Amino acid sequence: MNAYSNVLQVTFPDGGLAGWGNVIGCFVLAFSSFGQANIFGVFQTYYSTQLLPTYSAFALSWIGSTQIATIYTVSNLCSRVFDVHGARTLLVAGCVLSTFCLIMTSLAKTYVEVLLAQGIGLGIGMALQFYPIATVPTHWFNRRRTIAIGIVFSGSSLAGVVYSIMLPRLFDSIGFPWAVRVMAFLNLGLQLLAIPLVKERLPRHGGLPLVDFDALRDVTFLLHFASGFLASFGKSLTLYTPFLYMEPFALTIGLGSSLSFYTIAVLNAAGFAGRLVTGYAADKVTATARGRIHVPLA
């Protein structure tokens, strides 16, 4: 018998002030944290033309790809912290670390400094918040779960629209260092407002083992794990490449700096609509796990 055999049947509010308050809080956190992964192309364009012009597009893309890899790797390690200490610890730690690393990015002058601050440090900060953002809404919603998660992660797409338009203008008007600091302070303010809204509802599991080896003998679980891994692997290959290269590519084909940054905004706008539409459709069409796959793919 594994550690999860005695899990009680629970009911879900599927709404209410507290439930939708958590969705709003997670939406704002997705906007101000994970959404930054959707705008690295803006930074790559600036690095390739201003800060680090001697580095190739391939070398610069390692900063963004390292950030994304760090988010997904470290967020897996956050699950046990969440089980024991809850969402608040991870969210506050991620807020502090992300703000610090953005300030360090604004001060960076070399490739290594940018890689450490924006690629690794900021990636860890976003990872600390990614797991609670993805998990807490599932404590409050079952029948409306996919639309709730869709709303939450549409926040990251909205950030891609807003920041991809805002940052190039700020680079020109106040310079790169202060533009990044403005984003850091804006994110900090939004997160200070959002974190109190996010509260897990289900009991914590401090007594569970670090790794439940009994689950590895469950064929259904292993198949689900393998399908999730392969789906995420394929999605990451196709999803994030445009965020890294679309704006630099637009410049190479002569679109012009005044229009090229809109390509990332348009891409994120499509993602914003896609997450909402597929989340709503999945809840309406089917309540099975198969329907709930659509949201993370959007």
Image (cartoon, helix red, strand yellow):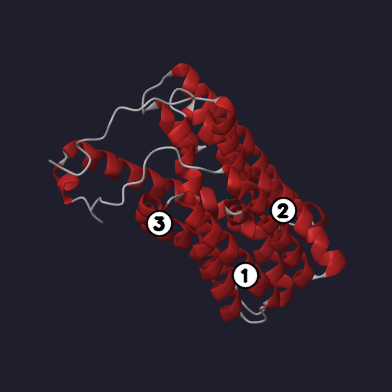
Q: Amino acid at mark 2?
A: Ser
Q: Is residue 117 above or below residue 129?
A: below
Q: Residue at x 70, y 55 (%)?
A: 189
Mark 2, Cα crowd under 10 Å, few <14 / some 14-19 / many 20+, is many
Instruction: Identify the image quadrant of the N terminus.
Output: top left
Label of residue 164 in the image? 2
Q: Nearer the viewer, residue 45 or 214?
A: 214
Q: Secondary structure at mark 1?
A: helix
* Residue 255 seen in this snapshot: no
Give the CA separation, mark 3 to mark 2: 29 Å
In primary-sequence order, the first of circles 2 and 1 is 1
Q: Secondary structure at mark 2?
A: helix
Q: Amino acid at mark 1?
A: Phe
Q: Which residue is mark 1?
A: 100
Q: Nearer the viewer, residue 263 or 17?
A: 17
Q: Is residue 39 above or below residue 227?
A: below
In primary-sequence order, the first of circles 3 and 2 is 3
Percent position of residue 37, x then y = 58, 56
In primary-sequence order, the first of circles 3 and 1 is 3
Residue furthest to the top: 285
Q: Which residue is mark 3?
A: 78
- Of badges 2 and 1, nearer the viewer stands 1
Percent position of residue 263, x then y = 70, 48
Q: Amino acid at mark 3?
A: Cys
Q: Is residue 51 above or below residue 226?
A: below
- Of badges 3 and 2, nearer the viewer stands 3
